[in-house]
Amino acid sequence: MEIDNKIMITCKESTFLISKKQQDKLSRAEKMKLQLHLMMCKHCRKFAEQISFIQKGIKRLRLKIEAQSANITLSVEQKAKIKEALHNQKK
Amino acid sequence: METNIDPNSWVDDYSDNLYRYAIVRVNDAQMAEDLVQETFLAGLKNLHTFQGKSNTQTWLIAILKRKIIDHYRKKSSRKEYSFDEPDERFADKMMMKDQWVKEKAPLSWNINADEQLENEEFMQILKACIKHLPEKWASCFVLKVMEEMKSDEVCKELELTSSNLWVILHRARLQLRECIEKGWL
C-alpha cells in the first residue's frame, strides 16, 4: 500500500503504518502522518497499543517455548531409528 | 578428511541438541524428529564439505537451520485462497472500509502493564491464534517475527517482493489481533 502525498491518512493506511513500524523504520513523513492520525483517532490508538502488545507477547512466547524445551530429549527408540537410517545410507 | 566417522556417536552426541533446536522452531515433535534425521543424513552425505572449519555441532545446526527454512518454504508455497484474495476485499472483511466500521473497531483490552504478558490465558490464545494463520502468512510471521530473520532473507527464501512481505505481515497482524480479541474478551 502506497501512502501518497496527502497529510491526512485513512485508518486503513494508518494500520498499515502501525504494522510496518514493528519491523521497519518509518520515513519522517510517514511518522508525522501517523502521529497526526493517532492524535485524532482512538480506534487506531487502541490498535497500535494492541499490535505492540502482541509483538511483545510473541517474543515472550518464544522464550517460553525455549524454556519448556530445554530438557526435552529424543527417546532411545527414536535415536535407534535415526542410527539405522544412517547405517542404511552409509552402506 | 575424516572418512570413518561413526554415525552412532553423532546421534549420541548431537541429536538431543538438534532436536531441541528444531522443536522450538517448528513446534511439532514428529516434524522435529524428521528434520533431525534428515540433517544427519545430509551431513553424512556432504561430509566432504565439512573440513573441520567449525565444530561438528555448529556445522550440523547450520544444516538443520537450512532444513527448517525449507520446511517453511514448502509450507508457504502450498496454494491458499486467502493469499490471492484482493487486498481491498480482505481489508473490508477484516476491519473496515477506509475507516473502522463500528462493529470491527478494536475493543479495550485493558493492557496497562507488562504483567499481562505473564497471563497464561493470553499466551494460550496467542499460540492458538498463530496456529490459525494461513500457512503462507504463518511462515512469513515465524521467520520474520519469531526467528528475527532479515526481511530481504525472508523475501528471498519465500520468493516474495518486499511489499508482498509487508502486506502479508500486516494481514497476519490484523487477523491475529481479531482472533485474540474474540478469544480473550
Image (cartoon, coloured by chain):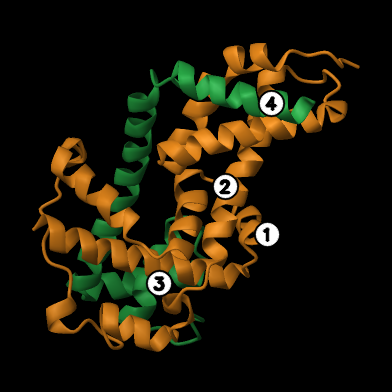
Chain colours: A green, B orange
- Tell me which chain the residue with mark 4 is part of: A
Residue B93 percent location from the top left of the image:
28, 83
Secondary element at tag 3: helix
Q: Which mark is residue A86?
A: 4
Residue for point 23% across, 66% down:
B178
Secondary element at tag 4: helix
Secondary element at tag 2: loop
Crowding near the residue tagged with mark 3, few <14, some 14–19, many ≥20 C-alpha atoms within 10 Å = many
Mark 3, residue position: A16
- Tell me which chain the residue with mark 2 is part of: B
Task: Answer above or below: position of B184 versus B107.
Answer: above
Q: Quadrant of the C terminus of chain B?
A: bottom left
Q: Which mark is residue B156?
A: 1
- Tell me which chain the residue with mark 1 is part of: B
Q: Which mark is residue B149?
A: 2
Residue B3 percent location from the top left of the image:
87, 17
Please indicate whether residue B170 sits to the left or right of residue B70 in the image: left
Task: Please say if the residues under marks 1 and 4 sit with CB atoms less than 8 Å apart.
Answer: no
Residue A64 percent location from the top left of the image:
32, 32
Depth check, front residue: B38 or B116: B38
Q: Are marks 1 and 4 on the same chain?
A: no
Task: Please say if the residues under marks 4 and 3 sit with CB atoms less than 8 Å apart.
Answer: no
Residue B138 percent location from the top left of the image:
43, 58
Q: Amino acid at mark 4?
A: Leu
